Image: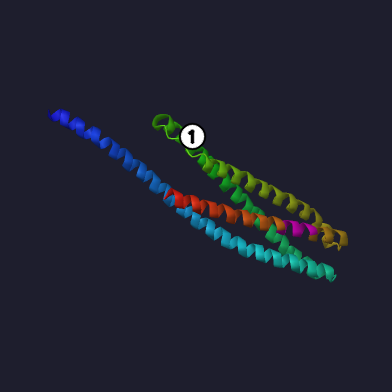
Amino acid sequence: MPRLDTVLVVLLAMPSVAFASKATVQNQETRSELRQDAAQRDWNERDAREVTDFANLAAALKDAGQDRMPRRYRDVNARVQEAITREIGQAQVKSAQAAQEARQSGRELRAGRMDASVTGEAPDMFDSRDDARDCDNALARYEEMVRIGTMMAALQNPIERGDRAAMKRNLELTDNFLGLLRRDFAAARAEAAEDRVELRENR
């Protein structure tokens, strides 16, 4: 009889252990999501400042070009080039992070499908699709930044020689890059809002 009691106790405890294990995993995921949300807020605040700063640089570059102030134009343009290099680097990091999140969502979806084969509970595919979309968009924005940055880099020697056509084209590309930064910032804010909704739902 004692042996039978022990077996019953173990069998009754198994669901509790499984529940506790699942709760632990969920708590870890929630903490991870909270850290990610805080990091995203910091990124968005920094991005907002940098978009404003770049818009001011673009305006200063345009003024110098219109007033035919080549030295002033070159000085502002050097700061524009530094900002573009920085933004491309940050876009690369964001793209890599989005790819990592998409891979993680894919793993979670596959694990959910395996659980579904046992529990019959269908996994949530929406998070995985959202992360895959965000990954594609982040990569596309990064590649477009690189494309514009490469074209602008090719104009720098003619600009140093005072080539007016190169300066004009450089202004157009600066405006294009600013537009891309604004779209990137708007997308990041939208993604952060979606993530906060998901976090509340998961709680």
The colour scheme applied to this rendered structure is rainbow
In magenta stretch: residue 142: no
Image spot of residue 46 (x, y percent):
58, 62
Q: Secondary structure at mark 1?
A: helix
Q: Is residue 71 left or right of residue 34?
A: right
Q: Is residue 60 above or below residue 30?
A: below
Q: Residue at x 39, y 45 (%)?
A: 26
Q: Looking at the rendering, which quadrant does residue 176 occupy? A: bottom right
Q: Is residue 75 visible?
A: no
Q: Quadrant of the N terminus?
A: top left
Image spot of residue 127 (x, y percent):
52, 43
Would you call the spot at circle 1 few (<14 residues within 10 Å), some (14-19), or many (20 or more)?
some
Image spot of residue 24 (x, y percent):
36, 45
Q: Is residue 199 left or right of residue 141?
A: left
In this picture, which residue range is highlighted in magenta? 172-178
Q: Residue at x 66, y 62 (%)?
A: 51
The three-letter code of the residue at mark 1 reads Arg
Q: Mark 1 highlights which residue?
A: 110
Q: Nearer the viewer, residue 164 or 140?
A: 140
Q: Residue at x 71, y 49 (%)?
A: 144
Q: Nearer the viewer, residue 100 or 134?
A: 134
Image spot of residue 36 (x, y percent):
49, 53
| Chief secondary structure of the magenta portion | helix
Q: Nearer the viewer, residue 200 or 139?
A: 200
